[in-house]
Amino acid sequence: MSKITAERVRPFSCGSEFADWRDSNCGQCVAEDACPLAQAIDLAYIGDGQMARHAVALIGCDGIWPKPCTLRHHKDDDSKTRQEVLDAIDRALCPTTETPE
């Protein structure tokens, strides 16, 4: 078993939890497989099961039981385009430190 560091955590206890959460969230999101969070989940699934702590927070895992992804935009809701959703995910992953003028 690999060491869990403060920067990386294991959001799911087994592969079934990974698959169930991903299907219920990424599988229903307009961003689908283009989402960097979905890609991070896939890498954790085939790797050591760990993800960056900030990514785990964004997908809604609080250490008790995973909740719905905080950035999911359902495919049936056409209020945002796929690119708008991906841009919002990118902003959440890499917030800028710009200061207002």
Image (cartoon, helix red, strand yellow):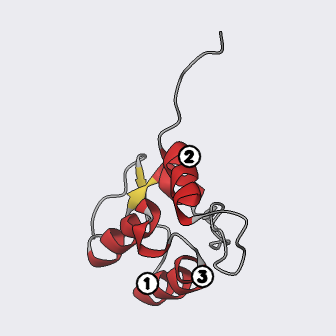
Amino acid identity at mark 2: Ala
Q: Which residue is mark 3?
A: 28
> Which residue is at a point 52% across and 50% down the rendered structure image?
87
Q: Which of 86/95 is in front?
A: 86
Image-based side of 30 in relation to 79, left or right: left
Which mark sits nearer the N-terminus, 2 or 3? 3
Q: Is residue 91 above or below residue 39?
A: above
- Give residue 22's position: percent from left, percent from top: 51, 80
Q: Which residue is mark 2?
A: 92
Q: Which mark is residue 51?
A: none
| Residue at x-position 37% and y-position 50% | 5
Check contact, mark 2 vs mark 1: CB within 8 A. no
Q: Residues within 10 Å of mark 2 (few under 14, many from 20)?
A: some
The tag earlier along the polypeptide, 2 or 1, is 1
Residue at disc 2, secondary structure: helix
Using the image as rendered, state which of residue 75 and residue 36 is in the foreground: 75
Q: Which mark is residue 14?
A: 1
- Report, in whole angstroms, how far the alpha carbon at label 1 lies from the one at label 3: 21 Å
Residue located at (51% from left, 57% from top): 86
The Cα atoms of the two marked residues, 2 and 1, are separated by: 26 Å
* Image location (x, y in percent) of residue 74: 67, 75
Measured from the top left, where is residue 76 in percent x and y?
A: 70, 81
Which one is earlier in the sequence, the residue at label 1 or at label 3?
A: 1
Residue 9, image quadrant? bottom left
Which quarter of the figure is the C terminus placed in? top right
Locate residue 61, reporting x and y percent: 60, 65
